[in-house]
Image: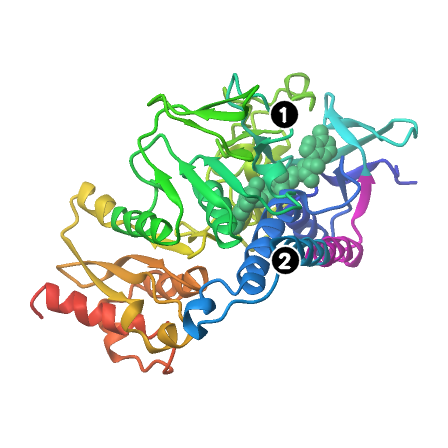
Amino acid sequence: MADANHYDLVVVGGGPAGEKAAAQAAYWGKRVAIVDRAPQLGGAMVGGVVSSKTMREAALYLTGFRRRDVYDVSLDLTPEVATEHLRRRTDHVVQIMTDAATENMRRHGVDRINGRASLGTDRSFVVESSDGRAPRTISAQVVIITTGSSPFHPPGIPFDDPDVLDSDAAALLDHPLRSLVVVGGGAVGCEFASIFTALGAEVALVDSGTRLLPFMDAEISETLADTFRGMGMRVIQGAGRATAARTEAGLEVTLASGETLRPEKVIFAAGRIGNTSGLGLDAAGVATDERGRIVVDERYRTTADGIYAAGDVIGPPALGSVSMEQARVAACWAFDIPLKRAVDSLPPYGVYAVPEVAMVGLTEEAANAEGIPCASGRARFETNTRAAISGATEGMVKLVFGTDDLRILGVHVLGDAATELVHLGQSVIHFGGTVEYFIHTTFNVPTMSEAFKYAAYDGLRQVGR
Ligand SMILES: Cc1cc2nc3c(=O)[nH]c(=O)nc-3n(C[C@H](O)[C@H](O)[C@H](O)COP(=O)(O)OP(=O)(O)OC[C@H]3O[C@@H](n4cnc5c(N)ncnc54)[C@H](O)[C@@H]3O)c2cc1C
């Protein structure tokens, strides 16, 4: 009789990567278990992604942010009432997404095991439950580790103070703020800073670098910083290392310049570290780097035989979108499933700030650094009909293309629905398309997508065609 505690695949971690690895293998007939220390599936996808995005949508909707200027009216909601609606809406969406993950596992016949897993030798595990049940030992032919990441805590910052938050705690904020300092000008920092500005808080965004979102096109990040300032946010760049302390005067955030800010709360969005402590990786022969991230090869194999890893636990780009793809690819290699052999080399990046920012392919600076002769074309949303109708006129579509063959190299969008619009550019790059694709294609009018056409015309004008 088959051993009930032995599986073809055990996935450790029930976030988006774990769920997709488990479903992929189960779909191809494997006996699969998924272990998570949390009672609900979903990982940071529900705790971080869904919470922060729902908070964003609700903040825009409830406060009438932006529409206020269009109709010259404001919605009559106090910040307290708005935040209560916002919290309720977030809880509702989180529940929908955790239910969907649970149903996906049920439909694929995946066994769910709740508890904290630690690896032994030969791909065996002990799973300790938090509800007093006896530890369970399971084993597998293949293991995929998808235990995700946790916020990095810079040394010396008092995260035990209830007003000093990391990015996970920030996603759980449940009351309006008068004032907020966000330290970190990356994706998570820009998102929280702009959401709370839209909610009416006095916000300072403090970044040690000289520009926000340094991986994005420089022109787009500079326009984003200007847009933030136009919304009333204070953006402090090149600020060095910020510290926080509780004094008799209250919470104080001190910048390298010596300036002291006294916000109601401070959020440190300082990157993430791999969730690998206590997993027993040494015993299993799985190597990690200095930030606790699991080292993998191009097939997502770790240094231990039969053990794979995917998602945030292996490090950048640490996106839900890419994590899920890595996990599917890992499952395909592990069981020789003839579906996927590599993750898309052109993943889009999206930042759900107010306004959104998204990119795919090369920035203008990257193309120049690679020595590719290139030019760019822009269309600003201030002249776009759909944007004018909705009052979301900040931002642009920017196309970066080769001057020799007019091939699109990169697409950069700042503005409403940027994270959706960027996929059009992604398809054109994937199919080797040129600027002329946008010239000859008919777009619905009025749409934000139409901006691609005018960016293309602008691009051709730049190169004298
Ligand atoms: C505020 C915020 C906003 C974000 N916004 C976006 C976005 O807009 N778009 C995007 O693509 N990505 C976004 N991300 C990133 C995204 O959330 C992660 O890339 C994604 O969740 C990683 O998935 P994962 O499955 O690798 O890990 P996780 O989602 O972290 O899941 C790991 C799971 O492993 C479990 N686990 C850990 N250790 C053990 C153990 N020893 N035993 C058992 N279980 C264990 C945890 O309980 C958890 O459920 C955001 C993240 C944050 C924090």
Depth order, front residue of 189/214: 189
Is 213 left, or right, of 20 in this rendering? left
Judged from the image, the secondary structure of the residue bearing numbered disc 1 is loop
Depth order, front residue of 67/394: 67
| Rendered residue at 68%/49% (across/down) | 25
User: How far is mark 1 from mark 2, CA to CA?
Assistant: 26 Å
Depth order, front residue of 42/78: 78
Query: Considering the image in quadrants, where does the C terminus appear?
Result: bottom left
Is 307 left, or right, of 356 in this rendering? right
Q: Position of residue 452 (x, y in %)?
A: 30, 70
Q: Is mark 2 within 8 Å of ligand 1?
A: no
Q: Position of residue 234 (x, y in %)?
A: 38, 42
Whether 141 is drawn above or below 338: the answer is: above
Query: Considering the image in quadrants, where does the N terminus appear?
Result: top right
Q: Which residue is mark 2?
A: 82
| Rendered residue at 35%/25% (across/down) | 240
Where are the magenta residues, as a range?
Answer: 93-113
| The stretch drawn in magenta includes residue 63 | no
Q: Which residue is mark 1?
A: 161
